[in-house]
Image (tube, coloured by chain):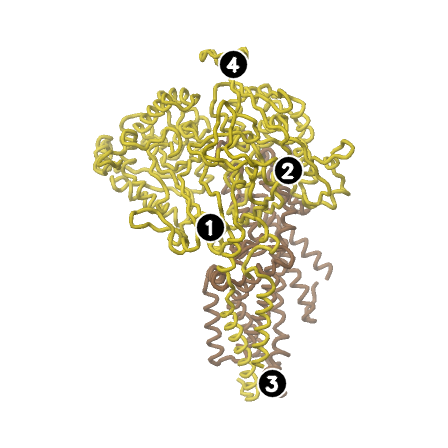
Chain colours: A brown, B yellow
């Protein structure tokens, strides 16, 4: 298995280079380094000399991919692409275009993201599976039909509606929790209650339908019929047999997103004023801070690959038939 | 079972309610709320808090409370008046000839010299950068071991202070010239401060990027035009006469900077922990920044070393450079703490203000109808809901202008030919900015007649002093010329009915726009309709701001919209937007229309070095006549700012030039506490209903499952 994991990490390198190349190209197709400099230096009284000096300081004065003025390997290494990308592989994210240490900021901001994402995932998972089992239990009855309509309804509504509606009802009308904000330690709870509730409700529709379809697929299989013919109650069949056997696809869905929980949610963090990594990325895109965008895309890719590897490993844990080679 | 549920609910309600008398939806901790604290919000995190490069209002909101330049704007006086802040008196100005000898002969004046004296016994806030043991600054060269324990400024065990001296101002002026600091005003100062350009070149030649070497160089090398006279006095020599220079001296760029702080923050190891001068200011002002998390909140606390300042009075006098205050007791600042929370979205920001958790707020377009209505006489007034809450409204016209510019280098709308001039003027008449203000700014603005906004010397606002090229005076009102008049001008320009008489083709013009939101498209539709009034087809080209700027720099745009916020309240700071030496294409300056008129330029050079007087007013009149005749801009509008405050906030004045106004704000905490408690009483009724429904739902599920399981009717 170790060999397999090692191989998977090696495969990740070309993926990372490709993603980095794509991000780099997209960013600099839209903006030239001069334009980025102008945006960072402000709108008033910016001189060409200042733009040049800003670019020089950040290494944006080099060519993008190929340096004609250099010879040999240097014509590739003395470029913005090489100099900005290479250090990412040793997790040196460097300084953002606004002058802050990116690694430090990421370390600080991943915890608030996790504080929302983890409870949302756990509570959501529990509720979605419970609802899905419930609808499967009453499959092909009016309860199931109403449940599916209800789920489709929940899925169809924009997340913004839940956020604004939740803030209006819970915070503005009932005055039960703060509308937005964040605090560290135990005080964070009162700020997290509403975003977590909203994230869970928003996810119920799609989550329940997804798990329902997984359970329905299992419930048609022969071993279920065998279990029933042995005289087991439907309740027991669902929990002791169907649920256990549906764990593999559930794990696939859950484990792959575990590492991504650190990256946070873009809209929820923005509306609730949570200083997480989701709003960090959005702010960076808005202020065209390439250093942060690059670091976050790189981190996102690594975490996604890591999530996929974790999924593979988890297969072996829940299904003894699966072996990684 | 039901009894148990009911009792549990009752007990939990009582526990929740008795934990604290603070409302459940309060975003602040108990310890914060009991203090004399001012609460506000910010929408966009400040990019820089280093006075050498900060240049936007969201940055000034913080650093102006911490750093103190030599002068400040009197809080209550209009027109705006400068008074000493850390200076002991207004500057002594001498004019010098080419040999640096004093002269009173105007023809011989080559340089001007400002002698600046600062007050004694002003102390910096306590800071680890000043802490010494046995005459050594122990935090200036931190070891790896020491750094392990440090993550924020609070982690330093010791701190100290020192007195403000003239050297600190000199040091900051030299920092302005260092291109590593990217000061936006280094280009302007290069033109004015004697020796600034040479000093800048010398600094640029230092090959090493070591911060220590640069600081050593700055400390040991003098700038020719900036000299220390004694511990509390220094002088600045300017290359020419430039009376507006004093306004620059009131801006944060000219705040004192202790070299100790620069060296302390220059340590790379601290930069890795984001402890930098750009994020943790060190000043002498009434407040110090104790928490800087621009992604969450910024907290200012009273600087215990602050010398105190008297609250201003309208009767204060400035006589012979000395400032005489009517009030005598040093009581400013009134508040102990200010908490600014990051609030990116409009809805939570507005709701938190209504709940009393922010002491003040602006009015966004979406909330305009909730906040403001027009009364029977057409005046703007607060809505009943807000009045009932005791909220007050302050309005003021900002010292800024928004305009639509014609690129004067363009072959159709540009140039000094009569045809193009008539075309520009016809368009200026057709575009109805009254309508624009009412649709897009909720009536918050004043139609512009020239670049100069209200409150600035030279502003046109009377029957015999208005833009006669575009407006008429009739029935005691200044009204826009009619569309028919615009059409006549168009005929004279050779575009009868929007058709080019020479080619027979319809006239098509191009407008460069930025942004892609719903507001932008609504505006562009409106603008197309304005041009359509005189049968001109307008094609709008929407790009991002970077591309737009590129077009402006290259001069490839035809018509565009832009704006300018004043650096200081002087007409020169607006009229320079039309001075040819500031042309965007040729000189990279702020004259985006690339307007050039020799007569205007000559008058501008004369006017800019004059003090406000009848003669200066006459020159400005002439200048405005020239530009109004040439119409390089559609004279847009000057926005009005609307600001709301709760009844517990005292000393509210709209002074749009002063940035250091937090020290004057006063809070009545007992009223605030009372109001917030009444407005935010928790309502548990719905919670009970929801809990009841959930319980009933769960119970019915159990019943149904048991029933179905017993039936054993399976597929």
Q: Quadrant of residue B604?
A: top left
Which chain does the residue under circle 3 lie in?
A
Q: Secondary structure at mark 1?
A: loop
- For residue B87, the mark is none
Q: Nearer the viewer, mark 2 or mark 4?
A: 2
- Name the residue carrying label 4: B96
User: Label 2 to label 1, Cα distance in Å?
Assistant: 30 Å
Is A245 above or below relative to B597?
below
User: Label 2 to label 4, Cα distance in Å?
Assistant: 39 Å
In this view of the protein, which residue sits in the foreground, B105 or A76?
B105
- Name the residue carrying label 2: B305
Residue neighbourhood size for the residue with mark 1, other residues' Cα within 10 Å, grouped as few (<14), some (14–19), many (≥20): some
Is A303 above or below relative to B412?
below
Quarter of the N terminus of chain B within the rendering? bottom right
Q: Quadrant of residue B27?
A: bottom right
Looking at marks 2 and 4 on the same chain, the residue that comes earlier in the sequence is marked by 4
Q: Secondary structure at mark 4?
A: strand
In this view of the protein, which residue sits in the foreground, A188 or A252?
A188
Q: Are marks 2 and 3 on the same chain?
A: no
User: Label 2 to label 3, Cα distance in Å?
Assistant: 77 Å
* Residue B331 in view here: yes
Q: Nearer the viewer, mark 3 or mark 4?
A: 4
Q: Nearer the viewer, mark 3 or mark 1?
A: 1
Looking at marks 2 and 1 on the same chain, the residue that comes earlier in the sequence is marked by 2
Is B423 above or below relative to B297?
above
- For residue B647, the mark is 1
């Amino acid at each position: 298995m170790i060999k397999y994991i090692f191989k998977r990490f090696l495969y990740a390198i070309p993926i990372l280079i490709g993603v980095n190349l794509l991000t780099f190209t997209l960013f600099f197709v839209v903006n030239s380094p001069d334009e980025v400099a102008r945006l960072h230096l402000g709108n008033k009284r910016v001189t060409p000399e200042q733009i040049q000096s800003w670019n020089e300081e950040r290494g944006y004065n080099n060519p993008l991919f190929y340096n004609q003025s250099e010879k040999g390997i240097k014509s590739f290494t003395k470029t913005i692409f090489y100099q900005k990308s290479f250090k990412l592989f040793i997790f040196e994210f460097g300084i953002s275009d606004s002058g802050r240490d990116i690694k430090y900021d990421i370390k600080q901001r991943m915890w608030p993201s996790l504080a929302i994402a983890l409870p949302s995932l756990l509570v959501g998972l529990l509720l979605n599976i419970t609802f899905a089992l419930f609808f499967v239990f009453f499959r092909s009855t009016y309860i199931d039909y109403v449940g599916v309509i209800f789920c489709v309804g929940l899925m169809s509504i924009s997340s913004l509606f839940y956020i604004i509606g939740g803030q209006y009802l819970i915070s503005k009308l009932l005055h039960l929790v703060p509308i937005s904000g964040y605090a560290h330690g135990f005080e964070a709870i009162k700020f997290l209650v509403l975003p977590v509730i909203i994230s869970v409700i928003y996810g119920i529709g799609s989550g329940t339908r997804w798990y329902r379809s997984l359970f329905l697929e299992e419930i048609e299989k022969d071993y279920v019929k065998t279990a029933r013919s042995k005289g087991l109650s439907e309740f027991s069949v669902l929990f002791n047999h169907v649920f256990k056997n549906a764990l593999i696809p559930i794990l696939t869905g859950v484990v792959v997103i575990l590492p991504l929980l650190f990256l946070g949610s873009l809209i929820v963090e923005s509306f609730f004023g949570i200083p997480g990594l989701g709003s960090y990325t959005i702010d960076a895109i808005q202020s065209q801070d390439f250093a942060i965008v690059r670091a976050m895309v790189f981190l996102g890719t690594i975490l996604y690959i890591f999530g996929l590897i974790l999924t593979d490993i988890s297969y072996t844990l829940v299904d003894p038939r699966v072996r990684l080679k | 079972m039901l009894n148990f549920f009911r009792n549990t609910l009752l007990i939990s309600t009582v526990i929740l309610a008795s934990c604290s008398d603070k409302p459940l939806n309060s975003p602040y901790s108990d310890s914060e709320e009991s203090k004399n604290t001012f609460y506000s919000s910010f929408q966009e995190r400040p990019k820089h808090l280093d006075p050498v490069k900060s240049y936007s209002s969201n940055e000034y909101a913080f650093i102006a409370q911490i750093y103190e330049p030599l002068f400040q704007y009197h809080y209550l006086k209009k027109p705006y008046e400068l008074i000493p802040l850390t200076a002991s008196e207004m500057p002594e100005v001498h004019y010098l000839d080419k040999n640096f000898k004093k002269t009173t002969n105007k023809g011989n004046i080559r340089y001007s010299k400002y002698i600046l004296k600062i007050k004694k016994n002003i102390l910096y806030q306590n800071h680890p950068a000043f802490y010494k043991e046995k005459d050594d600054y122990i935090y200036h060269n931190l070891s790896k071991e020491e750094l392990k324990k440090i993550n924020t400024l609070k982690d330093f065990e010791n701190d100290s202070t020192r007195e403000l001296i003239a050297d600190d101002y000199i040091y900051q002026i030299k920092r302005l010239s260092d291109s590593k600091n990217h000061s936006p005003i280094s280009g302007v100062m290069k033109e004015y401060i004697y020796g600034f350009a040479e000093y800048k070149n010398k600094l640029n030649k230092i090959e090493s990027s070591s911060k220590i070497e640069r600081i050593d160089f700055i400390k040991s090398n003098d700038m020719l035009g900036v000299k220390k006279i004694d511990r509390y006095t220094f002088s600045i020599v300017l290359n020419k006469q430039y009376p507006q220079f004093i306004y620059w001296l009131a801006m944060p760029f000219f705040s004192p900077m202790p070299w100790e702080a620069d060296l302390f923050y220059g340590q790379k190891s601290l930069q890795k922990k984001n402890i930098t001068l750009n994020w943790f200011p060190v000043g002498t002002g009434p407040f110090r920044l104790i928490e800087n998390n621009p992604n969450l909140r910024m907290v200012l606390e009273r600087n215990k070393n602050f010398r105190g300042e008297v609250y201003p009075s309208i009767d204060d006098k400035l006589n012979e450079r000395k400032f005489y205050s009517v009030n005598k007791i040093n009581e400013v600042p009134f508040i102990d703490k200010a908490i600014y929370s990051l609030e990116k979205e409009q809805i939570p920001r507005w709701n938190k203000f209504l709940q009393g958790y922010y002491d003040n707020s602006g009015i966004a377009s979406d909330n305009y109808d909730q906040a403001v209505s027009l009364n029977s006489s057409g005046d703007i007034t607060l809505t009943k809901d807000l009045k009932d809450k005791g909220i007050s409204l302050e309005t003021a016209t900002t010292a800024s202008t928004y305009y639509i510019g014609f690129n004067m280098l363009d072959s159709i709308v540009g140039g000094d030919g009569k045809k193009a001039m008539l075309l520009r003027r016809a368009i200026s008449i057709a575009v109805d900015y009254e309508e624009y203000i009412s649709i897009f700014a909720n009536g918050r603005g004043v139609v512009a007649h020239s670049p100069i906004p209200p409150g600035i010397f030279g502003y046109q606002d009377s029957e015999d002093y208005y833009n006669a090229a575009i407006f008429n005076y009739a029935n005691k009102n200044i009204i826009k010329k009619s569309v028919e008049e615009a059409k006549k001008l168009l005929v004279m320009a050779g575009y009868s009915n929007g058709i080019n008489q020479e080619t027979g083709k319809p006239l098509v013009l191009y407008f460069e726009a930025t942004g892609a939101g719903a507001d932008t498209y609504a505006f562009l539709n409106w603008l197309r309709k304005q041009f359509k009034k005189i049968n001109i087809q307008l094609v709008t080209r929407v790009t991002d701001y970077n591309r737009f700027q590129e077009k402006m720099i290259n001069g490839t745009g035809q018509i565009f919209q832009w704006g300018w916020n004043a650096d200081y309240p002087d007409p020169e700071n607006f009229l320079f937007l039309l001075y040819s030496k500031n042309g965007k294409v040729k000189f990279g300056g702020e004259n985006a229309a690339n307007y050039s008129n020799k007569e205007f330029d000559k008058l501008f050079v004369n006017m800019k070095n004059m003090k406000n007087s009848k003669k200066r007013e006459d020159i400005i009149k002439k200048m405005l006549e020239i530009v109004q005749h040439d119409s390089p801009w559609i004279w847009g509008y000057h926005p009005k700012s609307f600001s709301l405050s709760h009844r517990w906030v005292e000393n509210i004045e709209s002074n749009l030039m002063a940035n250091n106004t937090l020290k004057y704000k006063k809070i009545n905490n007992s009223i605030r506490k009372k109001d917030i408690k009444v407005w935010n009483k928790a309502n548990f009724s719905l919670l009970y209903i929801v809990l009841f429904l959930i319980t009933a739902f769960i119970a019915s599920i159990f019943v149904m499952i048991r029933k179905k399981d017993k039936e054993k009717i399976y597929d």
